[in-house]
Image: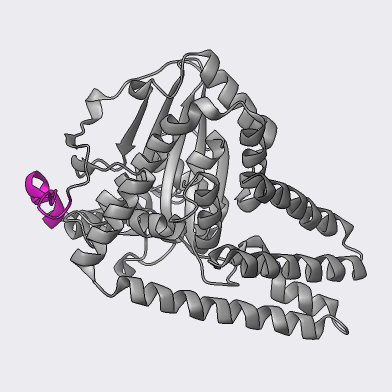
């Protein structure tokens, strides 16, 4: 495994204004009014902060902590900022909400890692009227594009810029978790990390949980990042997700952290912050494989005992839908390779087959999607796309053989 994997599971609040100073003041007041409405929406959670942690229902916990902005380390020197985004997009959709938002900061000269977790409802200008309540970080990427989303995330996290980004949807998250060792419970692990209804502070605790998951995974496996299997896992992770992060860049980050004292035993060199800082008390769970199973059972019991049954039904429905898309593409392949590309390009990018639990059926769907795309791209003269699909297949097959 590689640091990239851990970060994978493992977004300007104010626009620049033109016109008169009166217009600028009006615009600033409009933004402030919208921000005030957001603050009001979480007032109940903030007021109950002292009693926000439900310790009667959750026993799998390391501790309950109080976090304060002035207690964090302030490392000096070079820093690289990576934005990790979990995308909520349905099968075949080209865009979706940014439901998970985490800026992972690598302090290279200090050998430290900081995770800044941003709840999806955090105010950000998504271009909607203020009365719509849609101006939140989760909507910026879809409404205004990736560049605006990166800028908004940097502003909320109070960092100068985002150097690298990685994005993945539900299926890709399953693949990443399996690479990280959650082979038998990747789906339940993802359910735990996405859960918010079981907590008094809702999305704040969920976002913090995700940040802690990243931190714990980094510490748990960092010392295993210099063997052959780890290098193969990193390459496999890079082809599962969408990212501008390269293998060489990832190796550089790892080596710099290692050479400046970071290791699996230096827990004090990795921490989680929340932005904005509206809730200060959080429960810290242990997200190893056994801990996740127990948490999943407790959440299901507390929120909805029928969750396992509904999950199984959704999984069956999803497999039928994906099979239908593949069959339609196969029927189109003889006469219309462009229709094949239209049907399968997005499911391929989403690595949609990774949600299929049966490994043999999953492999068959992956090979069929890739085979149909390679043929369609070849027949339409898109050799670069042929090479990309083939590269993915080669790396993924080697990684699966090594597991």
Residue located at (56% from left, 19% from top):
256
Q: Is residue 303 above or below residue 319?
A: above
Side of 367 relative to 199 (left or right): right
Pick the front one: 367 or 149: 367
- State the count of labels: 0
Q: x, y percentage for residue 23?
A: 37, 54
Q: x, y percentage for residue 20?
A: 41, 50
Pick the front one: 324 or 26: 324
Quarter of the picture containing the N terminus is: top right
Q: Is residue 269 above or below residue 328?
A: above
Q: What stretch is highlighted in magenta?
A: 44-58
Side of 246 relative to 192 (left or right): right
Visible in this render: residue 324?
Answer: yes
Q: x, y percentage for residue 116?
A: 37, 38
Q: Is residue 49 magenta?
A: yes
Q: Is residue 28 above or below residue 103?
A: below
Q: In which quarter of the image is residue 203?
A: bottom left
Residue located at (43% from left, 16% from top):
76
Residue located at (54% from left, 28% from top):
224
Visible in this render: residue 126?
Answer: no
Q: Is residue 299 above or below residue 15?
A: below
Q: x, y percentage for residue 311?
A: 39, 72
């Amino acid at each position: 495994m590689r640091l990239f994997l851990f970060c994978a599971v493992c977004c300007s609040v104010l626009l620049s204004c033109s016109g008169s100073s009166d217009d600028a003041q009006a615009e600033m007041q409009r933004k402030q009014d919208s921000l005030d409405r957001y603050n009001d929406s979480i007032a109940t959670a903030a007021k109950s902060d002292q009693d926000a942690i439900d310790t009667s229902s959750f026993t799998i916990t390391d501790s309950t902590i109080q976090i304060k902005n002035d207690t964090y380390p302030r490392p000096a020197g070079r820093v690289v900022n990576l934005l990790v985004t979990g995308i909520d997009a349905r099968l075949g959709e080209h865009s979706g909400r940014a439901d998970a938002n985490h800026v992972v900061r690598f302090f290279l000269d200090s050998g430290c890692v900081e995770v800044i977790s941003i709840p999806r409802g955090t105010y950000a200008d998504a271009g909607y009227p203020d009365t719509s309540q849609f101006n939140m970080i989760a909507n910026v990427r879809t409404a205004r594009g990736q560049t605006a989303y990166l800028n908004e995330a940097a502003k909320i996290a109070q960092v100068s810029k985002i150097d690298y980004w990685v994005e993945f949807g539900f299926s890709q998250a399953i693949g990443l978790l399996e690479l990280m060792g959650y082979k038998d419970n990747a789906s339940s692990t993802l359910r735990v990390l996405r859960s918010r209804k079981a907590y008094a502070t809702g999305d704040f605790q969920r976002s913090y949980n995700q940040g802690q998951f990243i931190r714990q995974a980094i510490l748990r496996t960092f010392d295993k990042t210099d063997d052959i299997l780890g290098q193969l896992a990193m390459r496999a992770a890079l082809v599962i997700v969408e990212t501008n992060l390269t293998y060489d860049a990832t190796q550089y980050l790892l080596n710099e952290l290692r050479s400046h004292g970071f290791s699996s035993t230096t827990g004090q060199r990795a921490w989680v912050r929340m932005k904005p800082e509206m809730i200060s008390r959080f429960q810290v769970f242990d997200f190893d494989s056994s801990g996740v199973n127990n948490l999943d059972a407790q959440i299901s019991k507390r929120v909805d005992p029928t969750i396992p049954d509904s999950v199984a039904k959704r999984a069956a429905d999803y497999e039928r839908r994906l099979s239908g898309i593949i069959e339609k593409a196969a029927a189109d392949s003889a006469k219309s390779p462009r229709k094949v590309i239209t049907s399968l390009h997005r499911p391929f990018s989403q690595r949609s087959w990774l949600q299929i639990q049966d490994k043999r059926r999953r492999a068959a769907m992956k090979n069929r999607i890739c085979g149909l795309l390679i043929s369609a791209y070849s027949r339409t003269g898109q050799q670069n796309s042929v090479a990309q699909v083939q590269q993915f297949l080669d790396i993924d097959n080697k990684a699966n053989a090594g597991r």
